[in-house]
Amino acid sequence: MVDRSTVPAPADAEARRAVAPVVCYPVSTLPPAPMGLLAAARETMEKIDAVVVPPREGRTFKVPQGHFFRIVSIEGPQVGDLNLWNANDLKERFFSGKTRALHATHVTTGDRLWSNLPHLRPMATITHDTLGWYGFDEHGGGVHDVIGTRCDPYTHKLLSGGGDYHHCCHNNLTRALAGETGLSISEAEPHVHDVLNVFMCTGFTRDTQQYFMKASPVRPGDFLEFFAEIDLLGALSACPGGDCGTVHSSDEARCHPLLVEIYKPDPASLAGWTPPALNAYDFKA
């Protein structure tokens, strides 16, 4: 940790701190999701597929554009790490950093998951969140964060004094993607990216501003639901931290499976909806 007390404050320090903040990306200028249309479409949907993600493992799933999918808690409190790709082009993938900048550190109903540059378009829109009531607690914690990067074996080796742990979410997602696509592990690994931490309760400590986690409020039956704006390939890891209330990556935490459900709405309910086009910016040197 940096010892800021060793750096003398200038005479105008308080005046500098008092400058009013400016929101980087005003919500008023962000193209809104068609929540009314999606709410009507939800009323017509039927489940067409489901995938169970075992504890400390990862699994893939596919969602055609214009369909819905849910990540569901089924046996006990469990956090999931989610990656999304364009099912037809792995180069287009979820961009957690831009999603955070456009929405917030934690996402919920009405927020969208955006793809990386140069594509930058909505990949999925959150249409229902049974934990939407949580908000932010007294510690500054919220649910479904786009802050954390996913637990990985490289950081584990760094912080554990050289230990290896093979069921980190990074590895789970890599193995799942390799199994789905036929890529080798070394080919699949670069496609794995920063995640949406589904059901994870996180924030920053008040004193040191360090990233923290606490036991997730998720319970069996809770779910986070999305509308697929484009054809999606997803990968979900049931985190080895369980509800992330004690440890991050180990075999000690109690872990549970997660369920992914795919739903098809009546196509007529989406009349007038148009899949988002790739970002129109034309880069010219």
Image: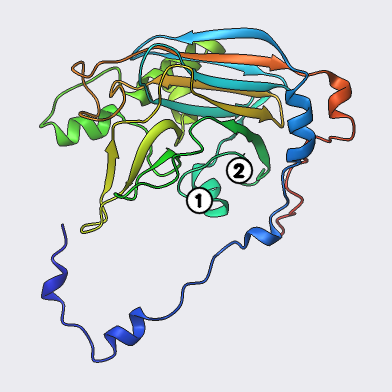
Image position of 19 with respect to 78: above or below: below
Note whether 169 is above or below 53 in the view shown: below
**Upstream in the sequence, badge 2 or badge 1?**
1
Residue on which disc 2 sits: 111
Q: Give the residue drawn at x 30%, y 17%.
A: 167
Q: Is residue 136 above or below residue 144?
A: below
Give the residue displayed 34% in from the left and 87% down from the top.
Answer: 15
Whether residue 256 is visible here, answered yes or no, is yes
Amino acid type at mark 1: Ala
Disc 2 is placed on an element classified as: loop
Cβ atoms at labels 2 and 1 below 8 Å apart: yes
Which disc, if any, is residue 155? Answer: none
In the picture, the quarter occupied by the C terminus is: bottom right
Quarter that holds the N terminus: bottom left
In terms of secondary structure, where does tag 1 sit? loop
Q: Quadrant of residue 114?
A: top right
Whether residue 285 is visible, yes or no, is: no
* Residue 8 pos. (x, y %): 16, 82
Instruction: Categorize mark 1 by other alpha carbons within 10 Å: few (<14), some (14-19), many (20+).
Output: some
Horizontally, residue 89 falls left or right of residue 251, namely right
Residue at left 21%, top 30%?
156
Q: Quadrant of residue 189?
A: top left
